[in-house]
Amino acid sequence: MKRTLFLATSLSSLGLGLAGCSTIDGAKNALSHGPLFNGLKGAEGLTHAVLGSHGLAKEYPDSAVDHEFRQNGNNTPGDSRYQGLVQTQFRDFKLVVDGLVERPQRFSLAELRAIGNVTQTTRHDCVEGWSAIGKWRGTTLGSVLAMVKPKAEARYCVFHCFDQDDSGTAFYGSIDLAAASHPQTLLALDLNDKPLDADHGAPVRLRIPIQLGYKSTKWIERVELVASYAAIAGGHGGYWEDVGYDWYAGA
Amino acid sequence: MADRPTVYKHSLVTRITHWLGSLAMLVLFMSGLQIFNAAPYLDASDKSDPGKRILAIGSDSQSAMSPGRGVTQVFGHAFTTTHVLGYADDGQGGESPRAFPGWLTLPAYQDLAAGRTWHLFFAWILVACGVAYMVGGAFRRDLRLVVLRPSDIPKLVPMQLYYMRLRKTPPEYGKYNPLQKLAYTVILFVFSPLIVISGLALAPGVDSIAPFLTPVLGGRQFARVWHFLITFAFLGFFLTHMVLVLTTGLGNNLRSMITGRYTLRKGEEGLGT
């Protein structure tokens, strides 16, 4: 009898313990969204102000390169327009650079290569925690911006992409002009001495080594200069930012 | 107890930074495990390198829906850790492939973005607490009472014997006993800077303005190893702290960290004010 009682008491306290656990889990989950939680994102601005966009990412020797560079995030864009461009090796592709600029322009891949061939072997740090080293070649975003001449009110570059997720939400990203004119911020065309393949962001992707990998937007078809990104899609400046990731990804 | 003298032990700055810092450490611990879950392995290298993997927590589950086995690999040795690590509580009443279980992470469900938001906010809070505590203590000049001095070293063994009840009386000491000083000194001047530095080394923005940090720690992935290991050193300190708080007069200890007032215990008469 006593033993049964003991067993029953133990089991019920274990049950209470587990229920307590799920109550705590429920509280932890409930606290992880909503206006109060969004207030915590204010720390991002402080981190951005402290770290700035003036440092230089470490450059590695070619021997450090990962030849099987890890593919992550969304898969190759599936839409027919993109697939058509892949089949013609982006022969007819033109990158649009417009918005708040004096001289909106369209650049073929050959024209982008002609602007300035810059090579950079840098480490790509993914927000998930892994790192890989790639050799990137392309033109600095700064030199492209110099050709289109941003207007005084332009503050951000928004990168519109070919890609959409399974629910049809368009992929996009943005950085400010300080990050855009950084000497290591590239519109990359090659990875490891080969033109970018579709998995790694062909035909043009951003490469911004002083921030985490999700800022290095893939499959860019248009760069738009804007004064604010608040009216674009979810309003947080990018697909991943709309999901909940920080806009400033230097930490 | 009642006729023993009561002293003002902890300043307001110490008490505020103690409780706020404790909350920050709890949030950082749980959100840190959430972040770890996004890449549940540690490599002693710069870039990711499975050949230098020292810890991996995974599952052999074929899909998120099919039940699986949790497997933890330490230096290549595999251990089955189903229900605890690798395949565990998903924070929503079920189980799924994930390194650390939902009851240990913040949020409980898998959400890297939310984990990062918690972590990067409370990292600033903890640094602010640390700076306020150090500056406040240095200003009042009582920080020196916490720091281990050469004269404390011969007293370490007698103090340990006293704790183990192999010695009737503790050696003479001031506000903190020699073992407390050793623990606090290591935490404040070794582990705290290391966990901050190893965390900073993970940020590409920091790497670009302080490029010496990451190589000192053995590379970017190695910095993750340090950050992880020091976390568990802090956990060890916390558990020891809990045992001592519980066994040396819980009510008195708690009151001293809330109101500042502490009733001296036997052998602490020398504490004075």
Image (cartoon, coloured by chain):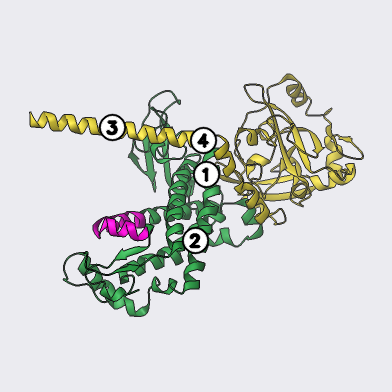
Chain colours: A yellow, B green
| Magenta stretch contains residue B252 | yes
Q: Residue furthest left?
A: A1
Residue behind mark 2: B130
**Which quarter of the rendering shows the N terminus of chain B?**
bottom left
Location of residue B89 in the rendering, given as x and y in whole percent from the top left corner: 38, 32
Secondary structure state at the residue bearing disc 2: helix
Image coordinates of residue B44 in percent, x first then y, are 48, 53
> Which tag is nearer the camera, tag 4 or tag 2?
2
Q: Secondary structure at mark 3?
A: helix
Q: To which residue does mark 4 refer?
A: B111
Mark 1, secondary structure of its residue: helix
The residue most toward the top is: A80
Task: Write the residue at 41% across / 39% down.
Answer: B100
Query: Which residue is labeled 1 in the image?
Result: B118
Q: CA distance from mark 1 to mark 2?
A: 18 Å
- Tell whether A204 sits left or right of B53: right
Query: Looking at the picture, which amino acid does disc 1 mark?
Result: Trp
Q: Which mark is residue A16?
A: 3
Sort mark 4 into few (<14), some (14-19) or many (20+) by Cα contacts within 10 Å. some
Q: Which comes before the other along the chain, label 1 or label 2? A: 1
**Residues under labels 1 and 3: Cα distance?**
28 Å
Which kind of residue does numbered mark 2 sit on?
A: Gly
